[in-house]
Amino acid sequence: MRAVLPGLCALAVACGSSPPPLHPAGSAGDEGHGIIGQQSIQLLTPESSEIEETEEQRRLREARAYDYDYDYENRLEDEDSAAFGGDAYGGSVYGGYVVRPWPVTPPRRSPDYAMESNLSAAVEGTISWRGAVPAKLTTKCGAIEPLRVNQDRGLAGVVVYIESVKTGRVVEDYDHPLIVGGTVAKRGCALVPSTQVVAPVPSPVEIYSDAGPSKLKVTVGTDTAVYALQAAGHRPYGLESGTARIEAEDGTLAAAFVVGLRTTYYAITDERGHFRIDELAPGTHELTFWQAPLPKLVDGVLTYGSPTVTKKKVTVAKSKTAKLDVALGR
């Protein structure tokens, strides 16, 4: 009996004592019973929890408040701030490490046309380059090829799209980006691919460096942002609308162009300059041909003007393929 009493007394003292203080978030003692642990309890059982919010808890809760406004750039700029977060489970700031928020689901969208299955009309053609082919340009990085023209003068990398249709193909997942690529990477003295489409915007674009660090500039309209990438690093970018030009800040790399569209009807000419757009409804359609601006070398720096944009109308019959060839250039 005497051997048991000390243990009972110790248990009684422990039961009657006050609970230990909360350990700071991220400290060695914060393993389920510190501030983060208490926050998790409140998150899972907010109605039944009788834990009073301390000043430290209030500060952390307010720091986690975040307005999901789909602004990818602001979200990325705030990554180094302790106020960055969202309602990530268990808190968003832990031991000085900032946790990314859960991906934001964009509002559901649907094409602004009447969807119809089994559309069988199409339009195809070849884009050719007329006039002299521009010579290579040489920066301190190396040689730059302004155009991709084959031996038959077929022009690669031209975006062809139909901006609006009244009746179009069935698209079940239109609320998800229907992108071809969505990735830009530094390869030698160029950012590749030179031209690509993301649709429908807004859409994500991943920008990658190569084996060395890169300082890249993204221009959309009159807005410009510069990003420093580590070796083999990457940077997500959200293209809201329009066309993004991605280039080296010092103008030594051939730029990449990402064309953001809202239409599902688009193509990019291949190495022969050929394009084809399928699943069209019979009728007259207006096609837009978008060619990236040619670079100019000014004091060793590549500069770019405006793209070449040409529009052509074509009439297609049911189950038929219309032909449309276009020549661009001087």
Image (cartoon, rainbow, N blue to C red):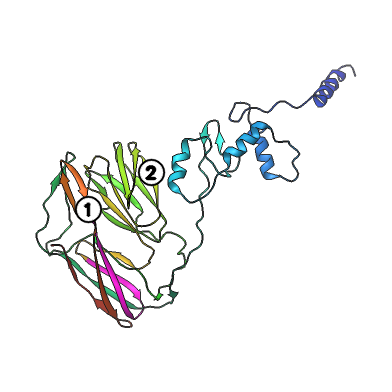
Question: Within 10 angstroms of label 2, few (less than 14), some, or many (20 or more) residues?
Answer: some
Residue 177 vertical placement versus 25 (above, below): below
User: Depth-wise, is mark 1 or mark 2 nearer the camera?
Assistant: 1
Please state which of residues 101 and 17 is positioned toward the viewer in this rendering. Answer: 101
The prevailing secondary structure element of the residues shown in magenta is: strand
Considering every residue shown, the one lying at the far left of the view is: 132
Determine whether, in the image, residue 186 is placed left or right of residue 9: left
Please state which of residues 14 and 3 is positioned toward the viewer in this rendering. Answer: 14
Determine whether, in the image, residue 17 is placed left or right of residue 134: right
Residue 38 vertical placement versus 264 (above, below): above
At horizontal 49% and vertical 35% (from top left) the residue drawn is: 81
Considering every residue shown, the one lying at the far front of the view is: 222
Determine whether, in the image, residue 65 is placed left or right of residue 183: right
- The location of residue 58, given as percent across then percent down, is 65, 36
Task: Tell me where the magenta segment starts and ends, as one range.
Answer: 274-292
- The location of residue 263, given as percent across then percent down, is 38, 66
Query: Could you tell me which secondary element the residue under label 2 belongs to?
Result: strand
Whether residue 85 is visible:
yes
Q: Quadrant of residue 171?
A: bottom left
Query: Could you tell me which secondary element the residue under label 1 belongs to?
Result: loop
At horizontal 30% and vertical 73% (from top left) the residue drawn is: 286
Tell me the residue that label 2 is attached to: 235
Whether residue 34 is visible:
no
The amino acid type of the residue labelled 2 equals: Arg
Label of residue 305 in the image: 1
The amino acid type of the residue labelled 1 equals: Gly
Residue 154 vertical placement versus 234 (above, below): below
- Kindly report the distance in space between the C-alpha atoms of the residues bearing marks 1 and 2: 25 Å
Marked residue nearer the N-terminal end (1 or 2): 2
Quarter that holds the N terminus: top right
- Is residue 314 one of those drawn in magenta? no
Please state which of residues 10 and 81 is positioned toward the viewer in this rendering. Answer: 81
